[in-house]
Image (spheres, rainbow, N blue to C red):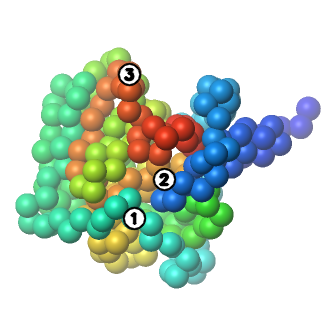
Amino acid sequence: MQNFSRREFLKIAGVSSSGLILGGCGVPIFADMVGAATEPLNQKFEELLFQPEKPVPEFAVSQIEPNQLIVNTFGFTPVLDPATFRLIIDGEVNQPLSLSLNDIYKLPLTSMVIRHVCVEGWAAIVQWGGVRLRDLIQLAQPKPDVRYVYFQSADRYSESWDLRSCLHPQTLMAYQKNGEPLPIQNGAPLRVASPIKLGYKQSKWVTRITLVNQLGRSRGYWEDQGYEWFAGL
């Protein structure tokens, strides 16, 4: 029997993020095609196929496409003072955290060159550098029943992920882009970066990470408008 990779299976089955459900990295294109009835099926397949410890192949630094990453904004571009910035990690944790950028910089730096994919139809190979989200979650000591993670941003954008995707070794809280400090328009001082999710899941200007045992009525800005929640690649 032929073995298929997760991406190959999703492509063949037609249940990928660009198949049954369409979203957007910043613009609600194809919103009329988003059907709530297909969301549970799509999510079930994607969660079933997701391998939380399997790394996504990366690219060489020479393959970076510095001009291909399109800047989408939710409403406005917040400017946060690095000196007073705090990342709050709270919710169902035993050790709530309020971390300065210097606290975050002291943690091990991970760098990866990956393809950032937007369902609008474009992609860019980018080098992100930062701290693994799993390291931050471990510091907060999550309670055993935690299953989901919410991200709140300074521009009032919100997102939620499943915990397993947050613990993937290539899911970062990034503060570097292409070897340089992360630009404001790309989410400075801290943003989510990962090769396992579509672009609209990768929140910019993140100020709070909240761990929960179940999702609330709001699951994220685009998701609340009917877009796919899992949005895996």
What is the secondary structure assignment of the residue under circle 1? loop
Disc ID at residue 21: none
Of pointers 1 and 3, the one earlier in the residue sequence:
1
Of pointers 2 and 3, the one earlier in the residue sequence:
2
Label 1 with label 3: CB-CB less than 8 Å: no
Tag nearer the camera, 1 or 2: 1
Disc ID at residue 200: 2
Left or right, 12 with reference to 92: right
The residue that disc 3 covers is 214
Quick one: quadrant of the N terminus? Answer: top right
Residue 21 location, x and y as percent?
65, 42
Label 2 with label 3: CB-CB less than 8 Å: no
Task: Please state which amino acid type lies under the numbered disc 1.
Answer: Thr
The residue that disc 1 covers is 73
What is the secondary structure assignment of the residue under circle 2? helix
Residue 161 appears in the picture as rendered: no
Residue in front for this viewpoint, 217 or 191: 217
